[in-house]
Image: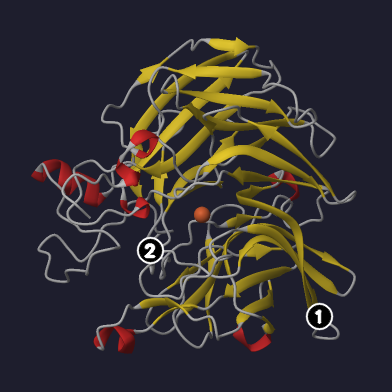
Amino acid sequence: MTATAVNPYLDGNFAPVSDEITADNLKVIGELPTDLSGMFVRNGPNPQWSPIGKYHWFDGDGMLHGVRIHEGKATYRNRYIKTRGWQIENQVGKAVWTGLMEPSRPDNPYGPGKNTANTALVWHAGQLLATWEGGTPHAVATPDLDTIGEYNYNGKLVSAFTAHPKVDPVTGEMMFFGYGFAPPYLKYSVVSAAGELLRTVPIDIPMGVMMHDFAITENYTIFMDLPLTFSMQRMQKGLPGLMFERDKPSRFGIVKRHGDNSNIRWFETPACYIFHTLNAYEEGDEVVLIANRMSSTNVLVSNDTKRDSDGDIPRLHRWRFNLTSGSVREERLDDIASEFPRVNENLLGRKTRYGYSGKMAASSTPLFNGVIKYDFRNGTSQIHDYGKGRYGGEAVFAPRFGASNEDDGWLVTFVYDTSSETSELVVINAQDMTSQPVARVLIPTRVPYGFHGAWIAV
Ligand SMILES: [Fe+2]
């Protein structure tokens, strides 16, 4: 990198914003439906200070951007998640931790690392949590988005906490896992509908892997042991700790929700990497998983794996794991690159007719130029295009109050217009994907591209 080269994740609409603001009565182009009531909150990296050394998009301090919609009016606020690390760096007045692309510094007087809380959000048992897969979740107040603090389930949390816990919409239980690079490499937990951490069990996998997401069905939990492996021995030899090992299989472990390692079933497929699952469900003897599959990944290991022309391109796939025969079938559902898949979460773990996935632009940085609605019953799809030079993020489904049809509701996401350099929240009728958004809420500040959001009924 030359002295003048700009890190793309600190440039354009990836660049952080410095102010926390609150703005009422936002200008709306179109009309906000009066039966859309709640709050869209999105998490993402927003480094408080200039980074030390190389910066990766995954490194920035978490910032929440929220738009609350009620009776056709909208309010915006953005707030840092004031983690312990954020508070220390705020007091010191500069960054004191390096990121994922730099060697870790175990002798750092402030501690070995920073929990940025920057990845996703989950609403469970009346509490909004900001998540980050390397550590403890943070409780956040709604609708103010003020940080309450680390949330450790009355001291019962004994593992890291995935950014993507899954809430069963019928029972209210929440499932999560934590992974690490020392044995046991994987721990699986269930939280009751009331928010009590009921149990944590170890699940055996051969070595540490980067495990970003998982899936649930009505009765099962599905783990993805994919060959993006971590090896201390490799690191001691001066090789990268984290590598994609394309000669190793992908392993999918299916366990009863309240089961454990003694009754998990493993299925193998050729090597792949999956960041996100769309959904999973049971059908006859099969457990079915739908997720965005890449044939390989260079994430965090860009200089150290063989380049694969088709690698790092996520496309929607479906797996059928037969619990009777032990067979697995893997099938590509679309050739279009997409990521950040979602469903109507009132049907999470059940067979859905529809799913939604962000349509990726051809770009060296992840940009979403639209959202695809998949109709799995008919095997068709429709695309909502954000327009020329306009890029969105994860589109989250917000159901209409009192809806009875699965797709009766809206998709909401922040869109950035590169020509006007402004941000807006777009509200798309999920039953009328190819029309213009029903409402565009103009945000009086730039909303940087980020990771995952949630629609919450507050
Ligand atoms: Fe994620």
Give the side of residue 414 with respect to residue 98, left or right: right
- Mark 2 and mark 1: span between their CA atoms? 32 Å
- Label 2: which residue? 134
Which quarter of the image is occupied by the C terminus? top right
**278 shown above or below 185:** above
Give the side of residue 335 with respect to residue 366, left or right: right
**Residue for point 38% across, 69% down:** 301
- Label 1: which residue? 323
Q: What mark, if any, has residue 351 been given in the picture?
A: none
Q: Position of residue 366 (x, y in %)?
A: 49, 47
Q: Position of residue 41 (x, y in %)?
A: 50, 35
**Residue for point 57% across, 33% down:** 413
Nearest the eye: 148 or 234: 234
Q: Is residue 48 visible to us here?
A: yes
Q: Position of residue 331 (x, y in %)?
A: 77, 67
**229 shown above or below 104:** below
Q: Secondary structure at mark 1?
A: loop
Q: Secondary structure at mark 2?
A: loop
Q: Is residue 277 visible to us here?
A: no
Q: Quadrant of residue 188?
A: bottom right
Q: Amino acid at mark 1?
A: Leu
Q: Amino acid at mark 2?
A: Gly
**Residue for point 55% across, 76% down:** 226
The earlier-in-sequence mark between 2 and 1 is: 2
